[in-house]
């Protein structure tokens, strides 16, 4: 091993990628990640120095909570100076949430944090996990002029590298499990890895900041044709949420309703923040386009532009914790671009 080789830390949290078939019972079980070289002898051929840490009890990512985001964050923060890049192996179900959360926790990164996983376990013949892991490591170790090429949190999956906070899981059966609808991919892997240099994020400041702490007092109200005012009223009256996300139609519209507007205004005057997220994955919220959206704008609801729901939730949780009962500061931070999460 040469000392000039890049150093990569793999953090294994669980998910399908780390499963192998138990020969006796024929069921899938997590493999001991310390034996990763046995499952993936190819790793030895990659020209970098790889260390791995594993959760003692690997988890299905449906069990992820902010505590897990902090656990992953702490591993990275404590080892930040020792490694050139980080690869986080994570279940796909909530990968977009975790990776978005990490993108807000680590601001002004100058190294890559690449999340990946797989649809088929690494111990299966047709696994997508090997390619995903090997290419994620290669991306995490890539430098130009001695600095890391990728300096942000990203997801590598099925030949595409995406900005983490722009992604959504779209499929539970295709290898192409993620999409970034409102932002181009950062790189595409073929024979070569072709980087979309103009899309790569560059930190605004030199100093890394690591933020922790989440407040999950968030409510989501999904609108559908036929939803009664009473239904909306019940949800609004029986909540202690500090941030209420309205999942609206199209460019941010809901049925015209004086009653709902009255309720929104009443909550807003008590310090609750309303965010308008569209049920459409492509495009942006523009509340002033139609009368049905303008009523929300006039009632103080904030349109989130082209942010994903995953980014809206994780960013809200982080800033809600920091600015409890200071909704103006919360709004100011929420509306400030932190890690390329919306288009200006
Ligand atoms: N349920 C699994 C998880 O998210 C699915 C996967 O890894 O793809 O942990």
Image: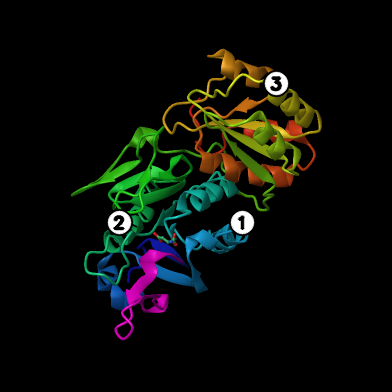
- For the point 36% across and 65% down, which residue is it? 17
Report if residue 93 is visible in the image. yes
In the rendered image, the quadrant that contains the N terminus is bottom left
- For the point 41% across and 30% down, which residue is it? 282
Q: Which residue is mark 3?
A: 299
First-in-chain label (3 vs 2):
2
The colour style of the image is rainbow
x, y percentage for residue 215? 69, 49
x, y percentage for residue 202? 47, 38
Q: Secondary structure at mark 1?
A: helix
Instruction: Check disc 2: other Cα within 10 Å, few if <14, some if 14-19, many if 20+.
Output: many
Residue 66 - label: 1
* 197 lies above or below 176: above
Whether the residue under disc 3 has CB within 8 Å of ligand 1? no
- For the point 41% across and 32% down, which residue is it? 182
Instruction: Check disc 1: other Cα within 10 Å, few if <14, some if 14-19, many if 20+.
Output: some
**Residue 334 in magenta stretch:** no
Viewer-side residue, 286 vs 227: 227
Report if residue 208 is visible in the image. no
* 22 lies above or below 135: below
The mark closer to the camera, 1 or 2, is: 1
Whether the residue under disc 1 has CB within 8 Å of ligand 1? no
The residue positioned farthest toward the left in the image shown: 191
Q: Are marks 3 and 2 in contact (CB under 8 Å)?
A: no
Q: Secondary structure at mark 3?
A: loop
Instruction: Check disc 3: other Cα within 10 Å, few if <14, some if 14-19, many if 20+.
Output: some
């Amino acid at each position: 091993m040469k000392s000039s080789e890049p150093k990569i830390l793999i953090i294994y949290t669980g998910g399908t990628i780390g499963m192998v078939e138990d020969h006796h019972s024929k069921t899938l079980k997590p493999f001991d990640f310390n034996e990763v070289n046995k499952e993936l002898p190819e790793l030895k051929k990659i020209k970098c120095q790889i260390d791995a840490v594993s959760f003692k009890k690997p988890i299905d990512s449906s069990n992820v909570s902010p505590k897990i985001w902090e656990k992953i964050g702490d591993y990275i923060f404590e080892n930040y100076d020792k490694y050139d890049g980080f690869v986080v192996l994570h279940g796909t179900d909530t990968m977009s949430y975790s990776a978005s959360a990490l993108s807000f926790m680590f601001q002004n990164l100058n190294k890559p944090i690449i999340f990946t996983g797989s649809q088929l376990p690494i111990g299966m013949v047709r696994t997508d996990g090997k390619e995903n892991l090997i290419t994620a490591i290669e991306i995490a170790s890539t430098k130009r002029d001695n600095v890391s090429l990728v300096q942000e949190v990203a997801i590598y999956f099925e030949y595409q590298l995406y900005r983490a906070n722009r992604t959504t899981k779209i499929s539970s059966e295709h290898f192409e499990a993620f999409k970034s609808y409102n932002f181009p991919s950062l790189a595409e892997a073929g024979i070569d890895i072709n980087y979309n240099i103009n899309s790569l994020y560059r930190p605004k400041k030199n100093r890394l900041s690591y933020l922790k702490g989440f407040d999950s007092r968030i409510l989501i109200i999904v609108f559908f044709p036929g939803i009664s005012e009473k239904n909306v009223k019940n949800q609004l009256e029986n909540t202690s949420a500090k941030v209420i996300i309205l999942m609206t139609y199209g460019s941010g519209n809901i049925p015209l309703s004086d009653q709902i507007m009255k309720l929104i205004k009443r909550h807003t005057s008590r310090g609750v923040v309303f965010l308008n997220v569209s049920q459409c994955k492509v495009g942006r919220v523009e509340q002033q386009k139609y009368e049905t959206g303008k009523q929300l704008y006039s009632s103080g609801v904030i349109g989130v532009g082209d942010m994903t729901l995953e980014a809206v939730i994780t960013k809200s949780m982080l800033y809600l914790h920091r600015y409890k009962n200071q909704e103006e500061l919360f709004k100011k931070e929420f509306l400030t671009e932190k890690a390329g999460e919306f288009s200006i």
